[in-house]
Image (cartoon, rainbow, N blue to C red):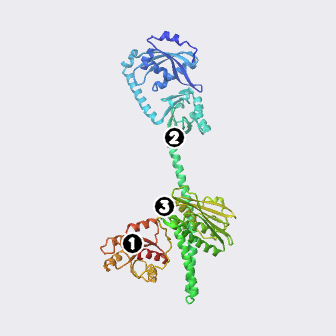
Amino acid sequence: MIRPINVDAYKRIHEKSQLAFCITEAIKNQDRIVDFSFIYANAALSSLCNTSLEKLYSKPFYQLFPGFDIKLLNTFIQSLESEQTVELQLLLNNSETLLHIIIYPIYKNICAAIIQDYSEYNYKIKENQFLQNILKEARQANHIFTKIEKLFGRFILFDFEEDSYQFLGDVTPYKNQISPCGKYNKFVEQVLSMLIDGKEHVNEILQKEALIEYFDDENKVFSFTLHLLRDEEKYERCSIIPLKFKNKKCCQAILTQQDITNIIKEREKNEIMLSEAVKAAKLANEAKSKFLSNISHDLRTPLNTIIGMTTIAQMNLDNKLKVKDCLNKINIAGNHLLQIINQILNISEIEKGKTKLNNIPFSMTECLKEVVAIVSANCKTKNISFKAKENFSTDKVVGDCLKLKRLLLNLLDNAVKYTNKNGCVTFKVLEKTSDIDKFSCFEFIIKDDGIGMEQDFVKHIFEPFARENNDFSYIIDGEGLGMPIALSIAQLMKGGIDVETQIGEGTKMTATIYLQRQNENEAFVNIEDVDNEINLPTKKILLVEDNALNIEVAKTLFESLGHSVKSCKNGQEAINEMLNQNESYYDIIFMDIRMPLMDGYQASDAIRKLSVKNAKIIPIIAMTADAFTENVDLAKKSGMDDILTKPISLTEIKRILKKYLSKQLYR
């Protein structure tokens, strides 16, 4: 870079001079002087600064000497702006070094400085104890100021009489955006240029006249927050405190700046979290109210049938046909009520993340037979055409046949439910190319020409208790749990469900699942094949149950199959009965879970520890209305072999007896 001065000429004059000498050039940012760089410095200056010449030329002044007195920088600026020679005596911080500095402009933005060490002539400071104390106090004040500066960040002195401002302390974070000193209105302009928002408001509150009027009392403090952009987005808390009054008017004030970005960000984060929590609570409350309303209707409907048919049966005890008809309807309503309760239990397990698959070998063909049979019967009752088509080659698979049936029946029940009389429901089963090794991909397409759904509702169809508000929602039973349960099962089987629908034209549901293919040595089983005659000889059953009506129901069902039953009312009685029996007397125990004195878990655990011969091998079957996964796990941990969910049915009793007492499986 060619400069309009002869540096070599100055070098020849000052190279060996005992006086420190330098030539500096102003560094500007948007026409504001923010620092100086060295064009030339002699050896005397290098010695005085205890810095090599190479280092002096490498960086701007305040990067080299960040702790140097700000007055020196201001004096350089003053010399250039006034185009006059300026003299300054500077007592360095934390030392007794006194410098006499003469600064004079050479050319535009370039000035020279002659610096002489006056420390040896400063005998008054050494000899005058008063000045020594003042110096000590000044150093202490500077130390305190430095510490406070770390807390508040920046201090800026406003002189309203001089119409000026001056940074006190480190100006580094702002030196590219705000000059270290200058006219007050220039300070306001520079602050406004950094603001992200609120410029008009800040401009209004920082007007000099407004501040002078506000500070009619020395105890007043004016605080505000700036949202600005420095190197990044920042929030700063600013406070202006009056320092000096003249003729009862504030003539000097100091502004403190404290970075509160982290506090603001944390507050915003907490506000968002609180807002989301309030929104979630509101939605949960709305869902709860909606659920209670829907479930009240859905539970009372079959209950009304049960109670009503019971009353009618009691009024017609002499009419066997009428009583039989009432009992059939009570049975249908009871099964419907049980289905609703099971749906609620299923969704509860889904929400807890405790739904699991029972992966056992089965035949896809056999599994689908029952699904088709159930849906065909439902369609026939409603006078709906039902068409089923199958196109798959992999029949023997490993998975949870019962949950697969639940998935398909939930989707098909919906299709039948929302299809009008004389409508049509189609069910297609396809095998697609699988992208998972050793797994087959099955696609189930359920299509109806029913009422269809609004597109807005499709977004919520898989949410628990979601039911579309239309004319059909008041005449069609449903607690809004079938779809989320179906989706949960599909996802457990590595797949999902897609929905296509149009109001008045119908709905198409496509469920995709993946099932592991069986090995050749695995044999499939038909899980539901429990109604075959088991021809068991009479077995002795120990029934542990505290409810008299439940005892009556269970005994009647067991005895109808030709078995003898002994009942106990709690776990302690069951233990006593096991101790008093002859060895291997009882063949199986049906144990209630919730009982007084000793519950089923404790009783089972105690029985397994008895010295009676068959105590460790006798099948113990839990009977419980708590059909949650955790209760099933607890039952097995306490020594029980299986679980029978209340209300118990003859079919389930047959399954349990066949499984544990037939010659093929008896231990």
Res 464 → quadrant: bottom right
Q: Amino acid at mark 3?
A: Lys
**N-term-proximal mark, 1 vs 3:** 3
Q: CA distance from mark 2 to mark 1?
A: 60 Å
* Residue 646 appearing in the image: yes
**N-term-proximal mark, 2 vs 3:** 2
Q: Which residue is mark 1?
A: 600
Give the number of the mark in front: 2 or 3.
Answer: 3
Give the number of the mark in front: 2 or 1.
Answer: 1
Position of 616 compared to 190: left or right? Answer: left
Q: Amino acid at mark 2?
A: Thr
Position of 612 compared to 322: left or right? Answer: left
Mark 1 lies on a secondary structure that is: helix
Residue 261, numbered circle: 2
Neighbor class of circle 2 (other Cα within 10 Å; few <14, some 14-19, many 20+) is some
> Residue at position x 51%, y 56% from top?
437
- The answer to whether marks 1 and 3 mark residues whose Cβ atoms lie closer than 8 Å is no
Outermost bottom residue: 318
Q: Amino acid at mark 1?
A: Gly
Figure check: 61 above or below 173: above
Mark 3 lies on a secondary structure that is: helix
Q: Position of residue 199 (x, y in %)?
A: 61, 37
Figure check: 69 above or below 194: above
Figure check: 493 above or below 548: above
